[in-house]
């Protein structure tokens, strides 16, 4: 369970609901970064944009929820890529 300043991510009927309110407007990646450059993988770009946007608020505020069996086969820049990028950003220690 992640909780910060009264905002919680909790499971209910097989879905997660964010309780609280947004203090900042929702940002849309193509509006913020422009069109996808030639030769750039859209999944890698999305993973890194999500991670870097989150890290901009401080690593202590990162709450990474990942459903992954730890196996390969999810393709380039899939779940394993995102997991490893979060792990690198988090520093020493294991993700739970």
Image: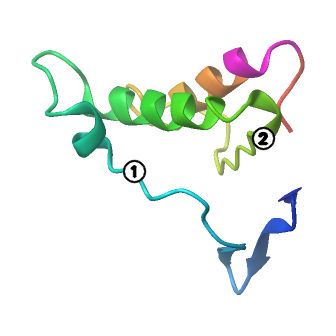
Viewer-side residue, 78 vs 31? 31
Classified by dominant secondary structure, the portion drawn in magenta counts as helix
Query: Distance from label 2 to label 1 (Cα)?
Result: 18 Å
Give x and y (percent) for residue 1. 87, 60
The magenta stretch spans which residues? 88-92
Viewer-side residue, 51 vs 34? 34
In reply to whether residue 89 is colored magenta, the answer given is: yes
User: Badge 1, how many Cα within 10 Å: few under 14, some, many 20+?
Assistant: few
Q: For this view, does 18 lie left or right of residue 39? A: right
Q: Secondary structure at mark 2?
A: helix
> Residue beneath label 1, please?
27
Residue farthest toward the left in the current orientation of the protein: 38
User: Badge 2, how many Cα within 10 Å: few under 14, some, many 20+?
Assistant: few
In reply to whether residue 28 is colored magenta, the answer given is: no
Give x and y (percent) for residue 75. 38, 31
Residue 71 in the image: above or below residue 26: above
Q: For this view, does 33 lie left or right of residue 66? A: left
Mark 2 or mark 1: which comes first in sequence? Answer: 1
Q: For this view, does 75 lie left or right of residue 85? A: left
Residue 61 is labelled as 2
- Residue at left offset 64%, top offset 45%: 68
Query: Number of callouts in the render?
Result: 2
Give x and y (percent) for residue 45. 34, 28
- Residue at left offset 16%, top offset 29%: 36
- Colouring scheme, one of rainbow, by chain, secondary structure, one colour: rainbow
Residue 2 in the image: above or below residue 91: below
Q: Secondary structure at mark 1?
A: loop
Give x and y (percent) for residue 27. 39, 50
User: Which of the image's four quarters has the C terminus?
Assistant: top right
């Amino acid at each position: 369970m992640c909780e910060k300043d009264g905002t919680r991510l909790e499971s209910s009927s097989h879905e997660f609901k964010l309780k609280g309110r947004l203090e900042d407007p929702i940002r849309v990646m193509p509006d913020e970064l422009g069109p996808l450059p030639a030769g750039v993988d859209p999944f890698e770009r999305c993973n890194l944009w999500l991670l870097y946007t989150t890290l901009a608020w401080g690593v202590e505020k990162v709450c990474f929820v990942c459903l992954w069996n730890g196996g390969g086969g999810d393709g380039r820049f899939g779940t394993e890529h995102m997991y490893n990028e979060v792990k690198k950003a988090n520093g020493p220690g294991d993700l739970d």
